[in-house]
Image: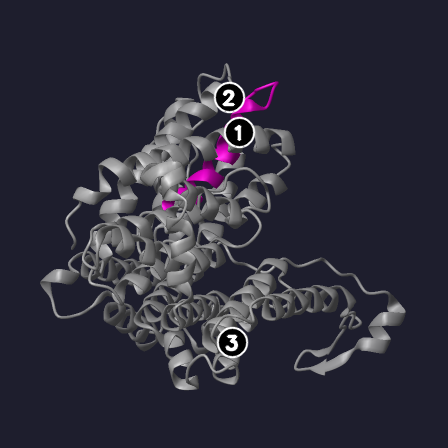
Amino acid sequence: MPRVDTEEKGETWSPTEEESKEQAIPSREGYVAQPKWRPTQNLVKLVASVCVALVVYFLTGTLSWQLRMALVLLVLAAGLWVTESMALGATSLLIALLQPLLGIRGFSDALAPFFDPVVVLLLGGFLLAIAVDKHDLDEKLGLAILQRLGTKPRRVVLGLMLTTAFLSCWISNTASAALMMTVAIPVANRVTDPRGNLQKIMVLGVAYAASLGGFMTLIGSPPNALAAAFLAGTSRKISFLGWSLYGLPLALVVIFAAWGFLFIRFPTKVTEIPIVEPASRDFTGWQKGTFTLFLVAVVLWLTETLHPLSSSMVSLAVAVALFATGLLKREDISRVDWNTLLLIGGGLSLGAALQESGLAAILTDYVLALQPLVGFVGMVVLLSVGTLVFSMVASNTVSAALFMPIAINLAVAVGGADTPLLVVFTVLVAMSSSIDFMLPMGTPPNAIAYSTERVSMRDMITTGFVLNLLSLFITLLLAFYVWPWIPII
């Protein structure tokens, strides 16, 4: 579960004694030191984003007022999201606030996407992931699986990657990467490898698998849920199981490709790895209860078409059950990733504003104008590459939110209102936004891998670049030759 790949970047701060006295504020635990307020850097970014939006305003005087304001809002939101001059969720709230003030649409309409069924789906998924983490169920399952992998390095690494990917289907890729890294590194440290290549393979394998596992389910990554929400307003909706028909094969193919490539990129002579014994094989009562509820949720999500409960209703029921059974307490609500939920709502609200104002259609026309030059294939490739490149400087959710309205309009323009391309193009944007294996700042799992100090920046860039190209090629191959034939479920 979420893909998010949208967490805030923070800095470690250690106050001096003088600052501690000056900035201390009362709290329940006593006095807690607070850093001085230094808004200069964020203020510069904020002013720069506003200035760019104003330039766009003055250069588009020939457009109608609604189109002009929608473009200004798009540029401002993109600037604030990319520079992160304020929290991503706060920018989303600003999007809702500005729509009625700029005359784009009403305040109620602008706010409605913030509690869209897909937001509820993610909320339930987040709460379930919190319960899994709180009762250490993820660690128990990870070690239990690892123990059954044997001693061969290739088999152990593949097992680690598949286990990480499985966990990432249901909990955040950050959490799954952090958890499995604590399992992988001690395993790698048990063997003698002078070049340290087995450690590099394990660390990068876990990081890549955590990102790829998010492809597999609707709650695996925020762009997935965002895609489902955008499709809900078209003639081609997609269910929980329906999404997995697209994401699961892609993730598995790329995981196996990455696994093979890592052993080519970092050759190792290690032939055997000692078996890791878990501290205890027994499940606690809390773990059994969490696992039971987890299985019920998965079954209901996958059989959505066989009962009257939508995937979002199942998520809400799971959330209620977690608190009703005592698996979660009131204080656990603070652990929900509200920033990501607000980001999803803001992305949906902005997308609806672009559609209603007609700006999305105009942007689509510009993309279609490239078709005579690059052809249909080139146009689709540009859509995918553009999403991927933008996700390198912004979060994958932001990238998906900005490109999905264009993808949907492009599909309608090419194939009509009921074309299968609606799903293909939208899924393509969601997947492309999450293909970023090069840089430590690209995704939280990449950052976790780099922080272990087992891989260098050069290792990550050279390996990730090849994997980016390989993943993009496989994704486009499936988009052209497989996805159009997948039945809508």
Q: Which residue is mark 1?
A: 463
Q: Magenta residues?
A: 188-213
Q: Which mark is residue 166?
A: none
Q: Main secondary structure of the magenta part?
A: helix
Residue situated furthest right in the rendering = 18
In the rendered image, the vertical position of residue 97 relative to residue 60, given as above or below = below
- The picture places residue 32, in percent across and down from the top left corner, at 73, 75
Amino acid type at circle 3 is: Leu
- The picture places residue 141, in percent across and down from the top left corner, at 35, 47
Looking at the image, tell me whether mark 1 or mark 2 is earlier in sequence order. Answer: 2
**Mark 1 closeness class: few <14, some 14–19, many ≥20 residues within 10 Å:** some
* Colour convention of the picture: one colour
Number of numbered markers: 3
Secondary element at image label 3: helix
Amino acid type at circle 1 is: Thr
Secondary element at image label 2: helix
Looking at the image, tell me whether mark 2 or mark 3 is earlier in sequence order. Answer: 3
Amino acid type at circle 2 is: Arg
Examine the image and state in which quarter residue 309 appears. bottom left
Classify residue 483 as left or right of residue 459.
Answer: left
Q: Which residue is mark 2?
A: 265
Q: Which mark is residue 93?
A: 3
Q: Nearer the viewer, residue 140 or 426?
A: 426
- The picture places residue 226, in percent across and down from the top left corner, at 37, 61
